[in-house]
Amino acid sequence: MTTSQRRIKDWMRMFGQDTPNHPTLPDDKILELRCRLLMEEALEFCDAAGFKVTVTPAWGDIKVLVDISKSRGVQPDLDEMVDALADIKYVQEGAACALGVDMEPVDDEVHSSNMSKMWTKDELDQMPPDTVVLAVGVNQFVVRRNDGKVVKSPSFRPPDIQRVLESQSV
């Protein structure tokens, strides 16, 4: 467990919040609180960055549509954005503590998965259209959509979160 998550876990215990020692699903009241806190902080970041967020109910596999647009006349506020990021991290790690999850091995697994998004020269012929390639090393390439999102390589490996959680359950 990182020092940061350990401090947040200590804070939560001091303030009477449950912090199980193994992965656990808390009750709906705790889950609703965690959802609300995460959304509030994410929206505060967008507001500080000068963007308006509109969420519209959708249908089928897509639960909501999110539209993000620049707020006219609003300049980004670096102090407020950094404050929101710190709050997001605090709330996110608090949610992990409420779930009884040590995020350090989860972060390691997700990082390993993200690194598998790297493309090799042999894979470049499978690139989707309207993408940009950036060479970052010997036989290592990053492929991005025009909006900047990284495209997963054919050899991408999704994170095995279940394995990490199972290792924390023993």
Image (cartoon, helix red, strand yellow):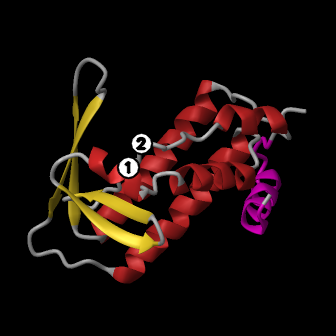
Residue at 58% from the left image edge and 33% from the top image edge: 31
Question: Is 3 included in the stretch rendered in magenta?
Answer: yes
What residue sits 42% from the left and 55% below the top? 119
* Dot 1 and dot 2 residues touching (CB under 8 Å): yes
Task: Tell me which amino acid carries mark 1.
Answer: Glu
Q: Which residues are magenta?
A: 2-19
Which label's residue is closer to the chain start, 1 or 2?
1
Q: Which mark is residue 123?
A: 1
Mark 1: which secondary structure?
helix
Q: Residue reaching furthest front?
A: 122
* Label 1 – label 2 distance at C-alpha: 7 Å
The answer to whether residue 14 is left or right of residue 46 is: right
Q: Residue furthest left?
A: 72
Residue, disc 2: 154
Q: Position of residue 110 (x, y in %)?
A: 59, 50
- Image x and y of residue 53, in percent: 23, 52
Q: Is residue 88 left or right of residue 16?
A: left
